[in-house]
């Protein structure tokens, strides 16, 4: 299982998803206030109230999908389907963070945004999911080629 490079890619993707919980996504600053967005919520609940539960649920589903992909190594076709679903879910996650949350906060609170470390983790996850999917597809091609030779 861990001998395959795509399992390592999937593990790095899962670790990146978990890391998103610990790093702020963006800082927002205005004339008299300063707050930041994390997956767990907003640092200053007195001014802007944003429900981040959908982000937490999507991140949890992503973690589950990636770990299912790691442990589905014997069924490569299922593994490809799981990884594809995780890629689509991650793309939706990226769109929701950038356009649903960050733009919404900027418009509501009339603040400037400064992106932080947490904003890059979904992109890292996307890259490693694509690398893992390519690895699984290459394995499937090798198995089919070997089956043809029998």
Image: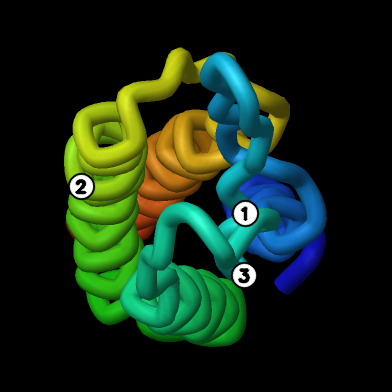
Mark 1 secondary-structure assignment? strand
- At a point 57% along the width and 32% down the height, the residue shown is 26
- Look at mark 1 in the image and give the residue it sits on: 38
Left or right: 100, with 134 as reference point? left
Disc nearer the start of the sequence (3/2) = 3
Looking at the image, residue 99 lies above or below residue 140: above
Residue 142's spot in the image, x, y percent? 37, 47
Looking at the image, residue 144 lies above or below residue 141: below
Give the image quarter of residue 31: top right
Real-space CA distance between mark 3 and mark 2, rounded to the nearest whole angstrom: 16 Å
Residue 77's spot in the image, x, y percent? 24, 73
Asked if residue 60 shows in the view, the reply is yes
- Look at mark 2 in the image and give the residue it sits on: 100
- Look at mark 3 in the image and give the residue it sits on: 40
- At a point 38% along the width and 38% down the height, the residue shown is 130
Residue 96's spot in the image, x, y percent? 23, 49
């Amino acid at each position: 299982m861990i001998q395959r490079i795509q399992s390592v890619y999937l593990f790095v993707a899962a670790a990146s998803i978990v890391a998103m919980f610990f790093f702020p996504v963006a800082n927002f600053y205005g004339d008299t206030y300063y707050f930041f967005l994390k997956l767990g919520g907003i640092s200053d609940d007195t001014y802007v109230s944003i429900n981040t539960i959908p982000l937490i649920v999507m991140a949890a589903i992503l973690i589950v999908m990636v770990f299912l992909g790691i442990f589905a190594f014997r069924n490569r076709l299922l593994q490809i389907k799981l990884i594809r679903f995780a890629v689509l879910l991650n793309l939706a996650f990226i769109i929701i963070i950038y356009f649903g949350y960050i733009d919404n906060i900027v418009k509501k609170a009339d603040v400037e945004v400064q992106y932080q470390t947490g904003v890059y983790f979904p992109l890292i996850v996307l890259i490693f999911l694509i690398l893992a999917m390519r690895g699984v597809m290459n394995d499937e091609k090798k198995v089919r080629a070997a089956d043809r030779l029998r």
